[in-house]
Image (cartoon, helix red, strand yellow):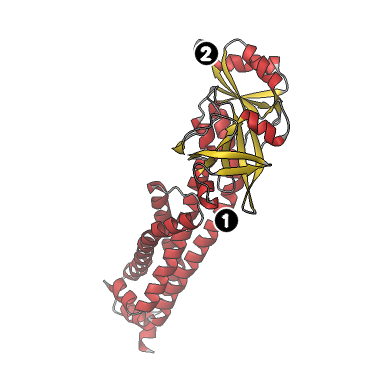
């Protein structure tokens, strides 16, 4: 009650402090939610295309920031290897999409609809491609640039019809688009080229044994199991995004610590004589310490509550204004942020308690 009484003495300052904490909470939660969206959109294509083996050029370990060039000749050899049931070719290439004088870039994915693997992980509207004059766009990309089912898309003077919208294909800075393998080769002007092969192995064969056979038959290639290749891409995604996330989140945490420390210190300075009187009356130091800690934790929890109330409407508005911003929020993220804020509150209390210890009982008589 004594801690609450202190806080009620300055309601405007309390409101501004809670607002500042709420903004820091929103910033940190937004960063982690964006990371969740990026992590899902960057690797969902790989996760959902469940094949036994991924075959790429030896220098490539992933498809997010790796380069791999293979030929249809490699595919012929792969299909002839004992145990290989399906060897699906896929071609990835960055291309420019033009619409009404505006240009944008997509991660064009050419695959063979007849073989199965390599297509969109999820169709949220329409259907997958069936012919060379069709394309499936990521739904966030379509929303941002105003594409709908049945619209024409211009890529390198090639006109394609939007027949479907995909989900789980938004990698934040780039979005996937899907066409047939033949059309992808026409777009880049090279025939017989692919990026990788997605292999399914007969149930009666061991994938590791088949992988060793491929390495012996085609020494210029590297073979990854599905789990290993997924981890490679996750690691590549994290290497490009996590440092930025941690830097900004750390700045937010520092700002939050400064805000709380300043508020608590100012409260102690303004009521220095009151604290001296309390010490003179024989109040144990634990009582005063608890009052400061309760203030810090109470303000922090109020800021967390305000931040959570504002966060979800704010995210809804942001995603409508910028469809390429995809967020994914979980209960674990929320709990983590609240725990971090409480820890920051305790650290801020520690800084403020040092000032409280410098108040002497005799100051009550000055």
Quarter of the image with the N terminus in it: bottom left
Up-down relation of residue 332 to residue 270 (above or below): above
Q: Position of residue 140 (x, y in %)?
A: 51, 47
* Whether residue 65 is visible: no
Q: Nearer the viewer, mark 1 or mark 2?
A: 2
Up-down relation of residue 118 to residue 270 (above or below): above
Q: Position of residue 247 (x, y in %)?
A: 57, 56
Q: Position of residue 366 (x, y in %)?
A: 39, 89
Q: Nearer the viewer, residue 138 or 356?
A: 138
Q: Which residue position holds label 1?
A: 247
Q: Nearer the viewer, residue 260 or 274?
A: 260
Q: Residue at x 55, y 51 (%)?
A: 145
Q: CA distance from mark 1 to mark 2?
A: 47 Å
Quadrant position of residue 124: top left
Q: Residue at x 34, y 71 (%)?
A: 288
Residue furthest to the left in view is 1
Q: Which residue position holds label 2?
A: 202
Mark 2 is surrounded, within 10 Å at the Cα level, by few (under 14), some (14 to 19) or many (20 or more) other residues, namely: some
**At numbered mark 2, what does the secondary structure look like: helix, strand or loop?**
loop
| 122 sits to left or right of 294 | right
Q: Residue at x 73, y 31 (%)?
A: 190
Q: Nearer the viewer, residue 224 or 116?
A: 116
Up-down relation of residue 285 to residue 162 (above or below): below
Q: Are marks 1 and 2 in contact (CB under 8 Å)?
A: no
| 50 sits to left or right of 2 | right
């Amino acid at each position: 009650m004594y801690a609450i009484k202190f806080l009620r003495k300055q309601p405007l300052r309390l409101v501004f402090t809670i607002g500042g904490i709420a903004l820091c909470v929103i910033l940190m939660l937004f960063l982690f939610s964006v990371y969740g969206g990026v992590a899902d959109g960057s690797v969902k294509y790989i996760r959902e295309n469940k094949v036994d083996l991924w075959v790429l050029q030896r220098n490539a370990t992933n498809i997010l920031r790796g380069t791999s060039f293979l030929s249809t000749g490699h595919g012929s050899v792969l299909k002839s290897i004992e145990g290989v049931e399906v060897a699906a070719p896929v071609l990835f290439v960055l291309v420019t999409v033009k619409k009404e004088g505006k240009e944008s870039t997509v991660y064009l994915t050419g695959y063979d609809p007849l073989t199965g693997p390599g297509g969109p992980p999820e169709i949220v509207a329409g259907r997958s491609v069936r012919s060379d004059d069709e394309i499936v766009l990521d739904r966030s990309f379509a929303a941002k640039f105003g594409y709908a089912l049945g619209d024409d898309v211009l890529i390198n003077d090639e006109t394609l019809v939007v027949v479907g919208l995909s989900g789980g294909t938004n990698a934040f800075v780039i979005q996937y688009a899907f066409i047939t393998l033949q059309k992808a080769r026409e777009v880049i002007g090279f025939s017989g080229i692919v990026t990788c092969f997605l292999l399914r192995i007969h149930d009666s064969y061991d994938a590791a044994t088949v992988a060793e056979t491929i390495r012996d038959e085609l020494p210029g290639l590297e073979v990854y199991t599905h789990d290993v290749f997924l981890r490679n891409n996750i690691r590549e995604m994290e290497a490009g995004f996590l440092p930025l996330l941690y830097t900004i989140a750390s700045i937010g945490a520092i700002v939050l610590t400064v805000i709380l420390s300043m508020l608590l210190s100012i409260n102690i300075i303004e009521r220095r004589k009151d604290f001296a009187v309390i010490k003179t009356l024989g109040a144990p130091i634990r009582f005063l310490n608890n009052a400061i800690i309760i203030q810090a934790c109470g303000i922090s929890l109020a800021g967390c509550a305000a931040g959570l109330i504002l966060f979800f409407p704010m995210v809804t508005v942001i995603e409508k204004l910028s469809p390429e911003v995809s967020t994914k929020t979980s209960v674990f993220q929320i709990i983590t942020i609240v725990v971090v804020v409480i820890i920051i509150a305790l650290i801020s209390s520690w800084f403020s308690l040092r000032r409280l210890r410098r108040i002497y009982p005799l100051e009550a008589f000055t």
